[in-house]
Image: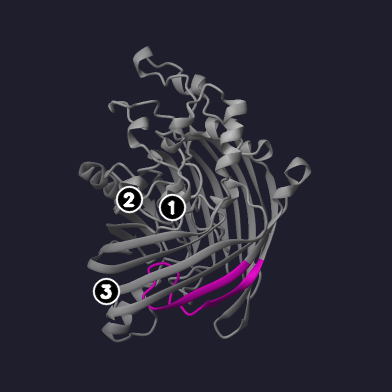
Amino acid sequence: MKKFVSILLCLCLIGVYNASASDEGRDKPKDPKPKKEKKEKSEIRTGWTFGILPSVAFDADRGFQYGVLANVYDFGDGSIYPEYFHSLYFEAAYTTKRSGLFRFAYDSKKLIPNHRLKIDLSYLPDALCDFYGFNGYQTVYNSGWGKKKADDYISRAFYKSKRDLIRFAADIDGTIGGNWLWNAGIGFLGYQIDHVNLAMINKGKKPENMLPEVDGLYEKYTKWGILAPNEANGGWHPYLRGGLSYDSRDRQQNTRKGMHAEIFWTYNAAFGEDKEFNNLMFNASFKHFVPVYQDYITFAYRVATQLTVAGNSPFYLSNYYNNLFIQRVLYEGLGGANTLRGIMRNRITAPGYAFANVEFRFKICKFDIGKEHFFFGVNPFFDAGMILQRYRMDENAIRSSIAENDPEFDMNDLDKYILFGKDAQVYRPHLSAGIGLKLMMNDNFVLSVDWAAPFDKRDNGSLANFYVKMGYMF
């Protein structure tokens, strides 16, 4: 892993090519200025700049990622640096665990005067999407069932399903006064969900490496009636979003001080057989950045919640963590690189939950390469989350459904899959901790390498929980 991270950092340093129509002569002011002021001006980027990189990353849940990405910034006259006037982001990548990423994102603070507009269009196929059942600890996780070398191995795809997601989002905000903003957005989420396509996964493999033809947890939940027929295969959900936010941060990336709070509601529509899944979701989050020592040490934390306040939420929408502005490829909660690091992706699936992230951000060293400004950093962190609203799982109804639809199943083994009563521990917190490394360029482009481990092995049976991503978690 150390070699991999070193190679990745080298690629980041040598793979970035910058072009700026405004750069020529920008460090040669007409009027002589004191040395200090000249140095400050040299740190300001102006005009257009772009970076082209191999889209190389690693995620404990998704595997090794390979592809290409490009980010184009327009800093204009530099008057709002390190913020930008326009940003265009392109990425196409695939992972060794058969998860795809095809995305275009546009972010502008100038296209509509006094407003910020952000547009996202993504196609995210996932041949082996994590599925760990409902309500966190109520669904038993047996790490050996998915590990080939384990004595009780069933299949590497036992806790998997197939999921394709098409997403379009258009969000805008405007100033109310001071640091207060109004927010609005429209978009749609299109999910196609099914059992793992074993024929595709096994194609070209030697017989000893093929995945066996057995039911995974997703198939069992479908057969047992826990997943309703109009929920099991996904659906299309246009949505409307609106809310308020407060932002006193000094900058969006590499924030040194300030607060960012938001509350908003999302109405997800559904049609036809899926119309029972019309729902209204409420989100609130609070981020606080406290400078401890100049710009070298910052204490940062985030607390957030997502609740289903009306209607019913299908499990796949409960796994989607709503955001006013999409910055990462996919926000999934709870569990994984974007909410609870070290805890398996989608480990906690419930209609309502809350979580918190706490970390110290240390800058270790700063340096320049040409006209680009870099720093290395380290950040120890602690993550916590818990269910606030659970899916109702009636033991008698489940047993009746199993008896009718899966008569060969031994009912005495049900507690190997689902726990009921006090044993379910639905509302028990899920905790993890770890440490991250950061490489930042020009206070905007951030390469992040995190490692984390859960406090409870039921949240992850492995310690190889590395995440190589772009940007800070929050």
Choose between 208 and 396: the one closer to the eye.
Answer: 396
The Cα–Cα distance between marks 3 and 2, rounded to whole angstroms, is 24 Å
Q: Name which residue type carries label 3.
A: Ile
Q: What stretch is highlighted in magenta?
A: 242-264
How packed mark 2 is, by other alpha carbons closer than 10 Å (few <14, some 14-19, many 20 or more), is many
SS type, badge 3: strand
Mark 2–mark 1 Cα distance, whole angstroms, equals: 50 Å
CB under 8 Å between discs 2 and 1:
no
Residue at 52 percent of width and 21 percent of height: 408
**Is residue 468 rendered magenta in the image?**
no
Q: Nearer the viewer, residue 313 or 265?
A: 313
Which residue, given by chain and number where applicable, does mark 3 sit on? 297
- In the rendered image of this protein, does residue 103 appear above or below residue 431? above
**Tag 1: residue type?**
Lys
- Tell me where residue 323 sits by quadrant: bottom right
What separation in Å lies between label 3 and label 1 (alpha carbons)?
43 Å
Q: Which of marks 2 and 1 is in front?
A: 1
Which residue is identified by label 1? 422
Asked whether the residues under the numbered discs 3 and 1 touch, taking CB atoms below 8 Å apart as contact, a structural biologist would say no
Query: What residue is drawn where x is 64% and y is 66%?
Result: 265
- Asked if residue 424 lies left or right of residue 310, the reply is left
Mark toward the start of the polypeptide (3 vs 1): 3
What is the number of the mark on residue 12?
A: 2
Q: How is the image coloured?
A: one colour
| Nearer mark to the viewer, of 3 and 2 | 3
Which numbered disc, 3 or 2, marks the residue that appears first in the sequence?
Answer: 2
- Amino acid type at mark 2: Cys
Please name whichever residue, 151 or 97, is drawn nearer the observer in this view of the structure: 151
* 250 inside magenta stretch: yes
